[in-house]
């Protein structure tokens, strides 16, 4: 119980920022059932710069508004096969970036996928929040990005 008392409380959805990707605010679903975090990305293009694998992509941080695309580029960490909530397997690019929530900034692994039909543009999975937050599933937007 002592460890739990020092952790910040977050709700089942929170506004987060991804400063390295140029995202000042995006609504994320906190999903303790998902191991990894993911974000809605389109026009995903893998390439190399001086032998370093990278990925270029666009993010539409506002749900139902693809007119505000943010261009992003990151080092490609790996490709990971992810099984979604419907049981479908998909190979996704994985990048390492920082996330900001509750006054803290820390690195997370983020998979890139098309989440256009999903209710949230981003999922914040359990690896990203482990040992940092407690989740109150009955509340929303308890912290600032």
Image (cartoon, rainbow, N blue to C red):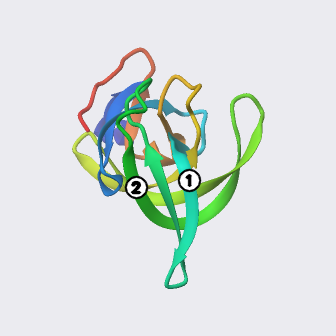
Q: At 38% across and 33% down in the image, what residue appears?
A: 67
Where the C terminus falls, by quadrant? top left
Q: Nearer the viewer, residue 14 or 131?
A: 14
Q: State which quadrant residue 62 falls in.
A: top left
Most distant residue in the front direction: 67
As measured in the structure, the alpha-carbon distance from the residue carrying label 1 to the one carrying label 2 is 10 Å
Which is more N-terminal, label 2 or label 1?
1
Residue at mark 1: 44
Q: At 43% across and 61% down in the image, what residue appears?
A: 73
The kind of secondary structure element at disc 2 is: strand
The kind of secondary structure element at disc 1 is: strand
Counting from the top left corner in percent of width and height, residue 14 is at 35, 29
**Residue 1, visible in the rendered structure:** no
Counting from the top left corner in percent of width and height, residue 12 is at 43, 24
Residue at mark 2: 72
**117 displayed left or right of 104:** right
In this rendering, the answer to whether 83 lies above or below 79 is above
Q: At 56% across and 70% down in the image, what residue appears?
A: 47
Counting from the top left corner in percent of width and height, residue 21 is at 36, 54
Where the N terminus falls, by quadrant? top left
Q: State which quadrant residue 61 falls in.
A: top left
- How crowded pointer 2 is (Cα within 10 Å; few <14, some 14-19, many 20+) is rated as some
Most distant residue in the bottom direction: 50
């Amino acid at each position: 119980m002592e460890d739990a008392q020092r952790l910040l409380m977050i709700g089942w959805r929170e506004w987060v920022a991804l400063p390295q990707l140029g995202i000042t605010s995006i609504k994320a679903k906190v999903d303790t059932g998902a191991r990894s975090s993911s974000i809605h990305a389109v026009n995903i293009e893998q390439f190399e710069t001086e032998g370093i694998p990278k990925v270029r992509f666009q993010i539409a941080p506002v749900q139902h508004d693809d007119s505000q695309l943010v261009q992003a580029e990151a080092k490609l960490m790996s490709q990971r096969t992810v099984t979604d909530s419907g049981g479908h397997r998909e190979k996704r690019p994985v990048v390492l970036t920082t996330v900001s929530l509750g006054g803290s900034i820390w690195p997370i692994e983020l998979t890139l996928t098309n989440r256009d039909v999903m209710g949230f543009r981003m999922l914040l999975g359990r690896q990203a929040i482990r040992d940092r937050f407690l989740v109150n599933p009955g509340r929303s937007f308890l912290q600032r990005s």
